Image (cartoon, grey):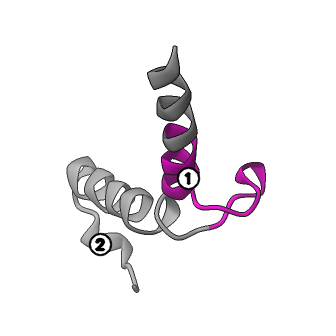
Amino acid sequence: MTLRVNELRSNLKAFSLIAQYIVGYYSQHRPHQHNSGLPPNKAEAKYNLVFYTVASFT
């Protein structure tokens, strides 16, 4: 995606584009070293699976 500075005429537009990037790519697809190479959404789903399984036994 090519972005021109003059397209960001308002902070709201800039905020919207940054949020789209975070939700669309960064959290869903980009691997993170801290999560053993998993994207944040997959790491969170894996954590929830383990956490809720353990929580249901207690």
Find residue 32 and name its label.
none
**Mark in the foreground, 2 or 1:** 1
Front residue of 49/24: it is 49
Residue 43 counted in the magenta span:
yes
Residue bearing the label numbered 2 = 6
Q: How many marks?
A: 2
* Viewport quadrant of the N terminus: bottom left
Vertical arrangement, residue 13 with respect to residue 56, above or below = below
> Could you tell whether 22 is left or right of 11 in the image?
right
Q: Which residues are magenta?
A: 31-48
Q: Residue at x 40, y 86 (%)?
A: 2
Amino acid type of the residue that numbered disc 1 sits on in the rendered structure? Pro
Q: At which x and y percent is residue 18?
A: 38, 57
Does residue 2 belong to the magenta stretch?
no
Please tell me in which quadrant of the rendered image residue 38 appears.
bottom right
Q: Residue at x 37, y 66 (%)?
A: 24
What is the spatial separation of the Cα atoms under label 2 and label 1, in whole angstroms?
32 Å
Instruction: Mark 1: give few (<14), some (14-19) or many (20+) Cα within 10 Å.
Output: some
Confirm or deny contact between disc 2 and disc 1 (CB under 8 A).
Answer: no
Closer to the N terminus: mark 2 or mark 1?
A: 2
